[in-house]
Amino acid sequence: MIIVTGATGKLGRRIVERLLDRVPAHRLGVSVRDPRKAQDLTDRGVRVRQGSFDDPASLVHSFEGAEQLLLVSLDRTGEECVTGHRTAIDAAVEARVGRILYTSQMGAAHDSRFQACRDHARTEDLLRSTGLPWTALRNGFYAASAVLFLETARHTGDIALPADGPVAWTGHDDLAEAAAAILAGEGRFEGPTPPLTGPAALDFDAVAEIAAQVTGRAFTRTVLVADDFREQALAHGAPAPIADLMLDIFAAARNAEFAAVHPALAELIGREPAAFRTLLEQAWAEQTG
């Protein structure tokens, strides 16, 4: 039995779909906060159980019988994030899970400039301390984040963001395929994987050139000082902690924390991962449509 948490989320749902191409539905279970959102999976023969990271007993029940558990990282930061992960890991130990896989991130380190990477490093420490077999999927930085950063520029033609550095932007679909391949036994890693990245690391100067190629119109790149970017983010409705988190991303990029490019993802999925241009074309076509 393979159990996946967060199976109604953007990454978790994709992983479940790709697992269903590889294993029978009765060997797959999901742990979700609201089972009603996974009714279609129930209809397809997947075991669906309610599990909340704020309710340890529910997680123990939803993890029951798991040879492998995929713990999809929470959309939280700081102590709240690590506490939730600790609850899930303790529940996995109590449920006698055979192996825990965790969606970490490239650049995970205690001294990262980016809070999420510090949270991932702490979670990997928790996994290490269980004594269970574990794997941390060091996922490349989601290309969807770059698309969000470009939302205003798509209309104005000006990419006005803080100073940055090269980032190995990576697609959700490719990362989901890799996770499913590992869970299905097509690849095996002990501890952290190599960075699972797209084929190139790009800064926003390079992204501006790609955006021009995609749209056929010119894009400029304006470097904002941190305070100006923060003020603009707040003016657009971002809560202060989110504005600060976004600034951390640029600080970490300048520190080359997301610059590594590695062939591990291509090897796992059996093809070249999608280039950023392809991902941007798809995202903007969907928004236009």
Image (tube, rainbow, N blue to C red):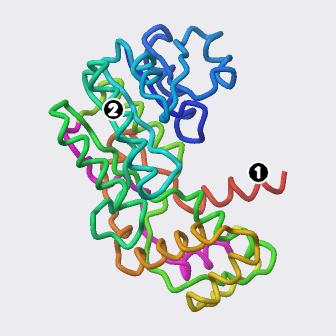
Q: Nearer the viewer, residue 43 or 73?
A: 73
Q: Position of residue 73 (x, y in %)?
A: 44, 44
The residue sitting at 35% across, 79% down in the picture is 255
Q: Residue furthest left?
A: 131
Disc 2 residue type (three-letter): Ile
Asked if the magenta segment contains residue 273, the reply would be: no
Q: Is residue 75 left or right of residue 150?
A: left
Q: Which mark is residue 286?
A: 1
The residue sitting at 66% across, 67% down in the picture is 239
Disc 1 residue type (three-letter): Glu
Q: Indicate whether 119 appears above or below 241.
A: above
- Magenta extent: 189-213
- Badge 1: residue crowd in 10 Å (few <14, some 14–19, many ≥20): few
> Is label 1 in a helix, a strand or a loop?
helix
Q: Is residue 124 left or right of residue 82?
A: left
Q: Indicate whether 56 appears above or below 236.
A: above
The residue sitting at 64% across, 26% down in the picture is 34
Q: Nearer the viewer, residue 51 or 133?
A: 51
Q: Earlier in the sequence, mark 1 or mark 2?
A: 2
Q: Quadrant of the N terminus?
A: top left
Q: Quadrant of residue 212?
A: bottom right
Residue marked by disc 2: 182
> Disc 1 vs disc 2: Cβ atoms closer than 8 Å?
no
Q: Quadrant of residue 17?
A: top right
